[in-house]
Image: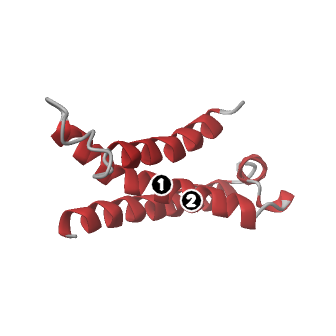
Amino acid sequence: MRYRSVFIGLMLIIPVTLWLLTDPDSGIIENIPFGGGLISVLTAFSISMLGIALIYLSRKGMHDYPVADFEQLGKTAVRTPEGAASYAIAISIKVLAYAIVIAAGIIGVLLG
């Protein structure tokens, strides 16, 4: 099993668990003696975690062609300096897209 599979699994389980914990109907969060603020912050961040997991899973589902495999693409790209640079830029764009999702989730929680 790959590390990213465990990571994506946790990114799906943690938000759902936090949302169940903080559900006002259950009353768990109102009766907790300490740590309520931390749980609230983690719940706010969990929106971004779920967004990243959904982006990753949708990318895997929509681009499941062998030519779109990032590992194989990386092995092919590093054969030339131009290919390595293009691959690095592609990974950077992907990471920036994840950062935008995280920022949008955090800003949405803070303002909403």
Q: Amino acid at mark 1?
A: Leu
Taking depth in this image into account, of 3 and 53 the one nearest to the observer is: 53
At x 29% / y 53%, what residue is drawn?
Answer: 44
Taking depth in this image into account, of 94 and 58 the one nearest to the observer is: 58
Crowdedness near tag 1: few (<14), some (14–19) or many (≥20) residues, C-alpha within 10 Å: many
Crowdedness near tag 2: few (<14), some (14–19) or many (≥20) residues, C-alpha within 10 Å: some
Q: CA distance from mark 2 to mark 1?
A: 6 Å
In this picture, residue 18 sits left or right of residue 73: left
Residue 54, disc:
2
Res 42 → quadrant: top left
Q: Amino acid at mark 2?
A: Leu
- Identify the residue position indicated by label 1 in the image: 50
At x 48% / y 60%, what residue is drawn?
Answer: 51
Q: Secondary structure at mark 1?
A: helix
Res 31 → quadrant: top left
In this picture, residue 98 sits left or right of residue 108: right
Can residue 76 be seen in this snapshot? yes
At x 40% / y 56%, what residue is drawn?
Answer: 48
